[in-house]
């Protein structure tokens, strides 16, 4: 009788069982990207109770009036609707639809003050679904600071921040919809050719795009400069859990052309972001918006939003529990 074969099969069985228990002990993994807060809450169920989470909006309210009660300022709320189109893997049944009609309505917004304000880092993750056609001037969820804080948006478009009054950071499509980029206002931003200070783009990569007609997970992070005399502020962007840009003091390399910084393998290191010169200016608002004023008369379009989470650490895309591992196959115990 060959005793080696049964012993070998027993060893294989033990190893398979060990692997099974190791896999079953793993935490939930993300559907897209690396681990974050959402990995601990499949479908975002219970994520609002996490100590690192500041605010959650999943648009599951039974009426728009209940939704609006959680925000400080609403624009064109009567045109918004709760839609049954939801993110794959969502634990909910609704999303928010913000329409626009050329020549009639340029979209709408929800604006929320964060209290207490944040003096370090803020992460905002949300899902967005672009329609298959249409143009968008500004969209997504912007984050920023205002001193003193106001209960409504005060972007002062085209004007350079002084350093003690305001700053803004966003991750959105470029105006021509050719790529996805930063759109940032801060005290050391660059001027445009018309002499005004429109938001600076800091990536300029034509290969970084957000597809139309499908739900996309967007997350971006703003880190304030501390001390306020330094330029060590940062801004990072993730699309579907993949970091596509991260700018800060000394990184990445690239070059300026007018108001925009193109990231490149060589060039001059990015100088950093001095978001503020006054410690009283902190991260204290988020602004969810669809601003689409450029479509022709009568053209109807809309943006959908879902699963908004604001936190002090990386969130990641919707978490899903791992499928139970299958038992080992073709293993037979011989006694």
Image (cartoon, rainbow, N blue to C red):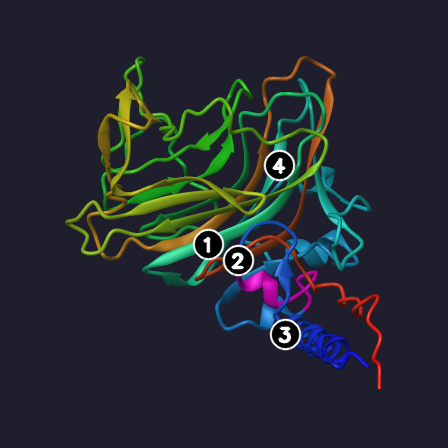
Of 23 and 188, nearer the camera is: 23
Specify whether residue 135 is painted magenta.
no
Which residue is labeled 2 in the image? Answer: 315
As drawn, the residue found furthest toward the bottom would be 335
Secondary structure category for the residue under label 1 = strand
The residue that disc 4 covers is: 108
Residue range (magenta)? 36-45
Provide the secondary structure element on which disc 3 rests: helix
**Which numbered disc flags the more N-terminal residue, 1 or 3?**
3
How far apart are the alpha carbons under marks 3 and 4? 49 Å
In this rendering, the label closer to the viewer, 1 or 3: 3
Q: Residues under labels 3 and 2: Cα distance?
A: 25 Å
- In the depicted structure, whether residue 49 falls above or below residue 96: below
Question: Which secondary structure, mark 4?
Answer: strand
In the rendered structure, are the residues bearing label 1 and label 2 in contact, judged by CB atoms less than 8 Å apart?
yes
Is label 1 or label 2 in front? 2
Distance (Cα) linking label 1 and label 4: 23 Å
Give the quadrant of the N terminus: bottom right
- At 68% from the left edge and 19% from the top edge, which residue is drawn? 102
Mark identifier at residue 22: 3
| Spatial CA span between label 1 and label 3 | 31 Å
Name the residue carrying label 1: 123
**Foreground disc of the pair 1, 4:** 1
Q: Report x, y in % for residue 177.
A: 56, 21
Circle 1 crowding by C-alpha within 10 Å: few under 14, some 14–19, many from 20: many
Q: Are marks 1 and 4 in contact (CB under 8 Å)?
A: no
* Residue 85, horizontal then vertical, whole percent: 79, 43
The answer to whether the residue labelled 3 contacts the one labelled 4, judged by CB atoms less than 8 Å apart, is no
**Which of marks 4 and 3 precedes in the sequence?**
3
Left or right of 257 in this view: 298: right
């Amino acid at each position: 009788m060959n005793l080696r074969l049964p012993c070998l099969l027993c060893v294989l069985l033990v190893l398979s069982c060990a692997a099974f228990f190791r896999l079953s002990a793993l935490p939930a993994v993300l559907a897209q990207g690396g681990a974050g807060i959402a990995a601990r809450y499949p479908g975002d169920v219970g994520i609002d109770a996490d100590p690192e989470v500041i605010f959650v909006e999943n648009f599951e309210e039974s009426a728009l009036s209940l939704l609006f009660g959680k925000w400080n300022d609403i624009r064109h709320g009567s045109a918004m609707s709760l839609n049954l189109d939801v993110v794959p893997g969502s634990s909910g049944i609704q999303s928010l639809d913000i329409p626009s009609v050329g020549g009639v309505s340029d979209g709408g917004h929800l604006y929320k003050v964060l209290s207490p304000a944040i003096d370090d880092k803020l992460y905002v993750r949300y899902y967005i679904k672009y329609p298959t056609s249409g143009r968008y001037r500004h969209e997504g969820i912007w984050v920023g600071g205002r001193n003193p804080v106001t209960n409504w948006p005060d972007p002062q478009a085209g004007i350079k921040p002084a350093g003690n009054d305001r700053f803004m950071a966003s991750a959105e499509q470029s105006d021509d919809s050719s790529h996805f980029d930063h759109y940032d206002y801060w005290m050391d931003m660059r001027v445009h050719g018309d002499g005004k200070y429109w938001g600076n783009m800091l990536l300029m990569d034509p290969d970084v795009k957000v597809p139309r007609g499908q739900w996309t997970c967007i997350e971006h992070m703003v880190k304030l400069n501390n001390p306020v005399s330094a330029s060590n502020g940062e801004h990072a962007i993730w699309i579907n859990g993949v970091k596509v840009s991260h700018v800060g003091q000394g990184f990445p390399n690239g070059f300026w052309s007018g108001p925009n910084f193109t990231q490149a393998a060589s060039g001059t290191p990015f100088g950093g972001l001095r978001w503020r010169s006054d410690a009283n200016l902190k991260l204290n608002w988020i602004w969810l918006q669809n601003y689409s004023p450029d479509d022709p008369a009568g053209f109807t379009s809309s943006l959908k939003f879902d699963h908004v989470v604001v936190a002090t650490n990386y969130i990641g895309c919707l978490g899903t529990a791992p499928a139970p591992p299958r038992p080992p196959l073709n293993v037979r115990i011989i006694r």
